[in-house]
Amino acid sequence: MCGIVGYIGTKKASPILINGLLRLEYRGYDSAGISTIEKEGLSMMKDKGRVKNLYHLEGIDNLEGTIGIAHTRWATHGKPAKENSHPHMDNSKTFSVVHNGIIENYHELRKFLTEHGYTFYSQTDTEVVPNLIHYYYNQDTNHDEMKFLRATKNACNDLKGSFALEIICKDYPDHMIVIRKDSPLVIGKGEGENYICSDIPAILSFTREFYLLEDFEFVVLARDDAKFYDKDLNPINKKTQTIEWNASSAEKDGYEDYMLKEIYEQPTAIRETIGAKLNEGTKCEFEELNYSKDYLKGLNKIYLVACGTAMHAGLAGKNILERLCKIPTEVDIASEFRYRNPIIDDKTLCIFISQSGETADTIAALKLSREKGAKTLAITNVIGSSITREADNSIYTHAGPEIAVASTKAYTSQVILLAILGIYFAETLEISENEVAALKQDMATLPSKIEETLKCAKTVKEFGKRIYQEKDVFFLGRGIDETVARESALKLKEISYIHADSYPAGELKHGPIALIENDITVISIMTDSKLVEKTVSNIQEVITRGAKTLVVTNQKVDDKMFDTVIHIPETNPFIAPILSVIPLQLLSYYISKEKGLDVDKPRNLAKSVTVE
Ligand code: AGP
């Protein structure tokens, strides 16, 4: 999705802006651009293609301005092309704007502005914004220091949809205005300078002090000042928050790719997410939550709502919440949930899982649940992300920044946090004492078991070399292993472009077995002692039809039956996905590398999907 960077200070802005955009490349984009305030007015340099192409644009080295805005675009309205790239200026070149989000009523606004003499040069929804600001600016006869802000506010009042905007104006060479609504944007406070970005990692190397904005708050930034206003332009006070991530955690640290680094960071991510929550002899506490026994007892249902990998973590969560806490739990895909009129009331708890905290469908589902009277809880990795501002309560995975588009450490951290939440619920409800005690014990040894599991990399790589040219791969599992099959198939699809499908192993003979032919690859996960025999007999059915098989298991199986077996450590079934997914994350990674693909930035995908 689109990325935004901005700078106002005393240094030359253009290298800072381009550097920030490079750090946002992982979000997925098709064009890039910057705009600065120069002595002679506003500059604008943009083109389709990679951020580094900006270095080749004529005049880019001559930019001296110390205020600038920058953008990577992921096309929604209008094809990837120079004219559709951001920034966009108004016709008189007074304002330059970058925008994330979607202006839903841009047709209407374009018509209005065209009737008032404005011309449009792009197919984007964004181009209405600088022209609308200019329209209001021209109408205003007061030439005071608030004129730029008033025009911006009047224009924003007319916008429907979602937007994070950075605006510079040639008449106000020492100021920049930013505003957000339903689209991420934060301000990093430096010494005599301010940084703006849609994603904290882009500016972590400059500052750890951030202002987090609420919807419809306007900010007028100067070099050593930031003034905040509400939607009616009443001044408001805002304090910075310190973000604990360090810049090197957003770098590759010697790994070839972010995805590989993030796979290997899982022991740390799990340790950090467990933190001090599971002390022996004391009950699990979440200082952010105060659900009483009566409230939990009175719940008619828990919904776990999310997209993609986060939804797969929700499937593991359902298993935990139903079995350990005895609360009926449903898992829903956020983009479906919001349109299926789910049955929700004040006895429903809706939990939203999102690594980025910015996924538009998940946030919309949260808003719907709140309107219907449910309590809402967000599980996210990003402090201050949009979802945390919408939810009644938020709890955090401590996975550190996840840069690769393919989610790995976020998934395993979400599963562990859901397990901790399950323990908290069960202890509050005073049920499942023995299961809780066993789970707590198994959690304590989990990080070292992840380290142990990671040792399978060599075997996995070899298997990857055998199958990287395949067209179809099938993943099978039963019970909790079926949820890992789904996640593993998604991972393979997104970074290797191999068609991958997952099925409950028992479902095979109800249709999918028709697709099994000689030499096709079938991968199965077997971590449940009660189900292993049944899965083995399903795999026998595909072996008979000529399939090659990879098995990931913590059970005793007859290794000779299968082509390759990856043995992983045994652990509590509730958290088994955290170990069994690892060889299959690695498999996707190595297949993608073998095919020479861009592992961290797969085609057509964006790290956080901030539009519907
Ligand atoms: C995971 O590999 C995917 N790239 C994707 O499915 C992702 O999990 C999904 O878009 C949800 O993102 P979120 O956790 O940031 O809400």
Image (spheres, rainbow, N blue to C red):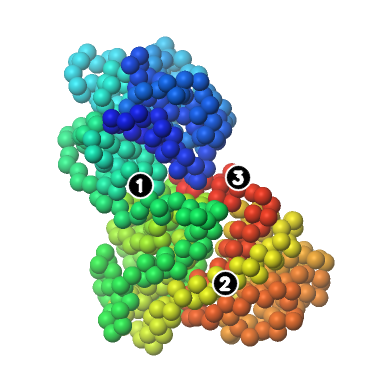
- Confirm or deny contact between disc 1 and disc 3 (CB under 8 A): no
Mark 1 residue type: Leu
Quadrant in the picture for residue 406: bottom right
Asked whether residue 281 is in view, the answer is yes
- Residue bearing mark 3: 603
Asked whether residue 134 is in view, the answer is no
Q: CA distance from mark 1 to mark 2?
A: 32 Å
Is residue 596 found left or right of 392 in the rendered image?
A: right
Q: Is residue 319 above or below residue 223?
A: below
Q: Residue at x 46, y 24 (%)?
A: 60
Disc 1 or 2, which lies upstream in sequence? 1
Disc 1 or 3, which lies upstream in sequence? 1
Mark 3 residue type: Arg
Label 2 secondary element: helix
Q: Nearer the viewer, residue 390 or 193?
A: 193
- Residue bearing mark 1: 204
Horizontal and vertical percent for residue 450? 50, 72
Q: Residue at x 38, y 13 (%)?
A: 92
- Residue bearing mark 2: 455
Disc 3 C-beta below 8 A from ligand 1: no
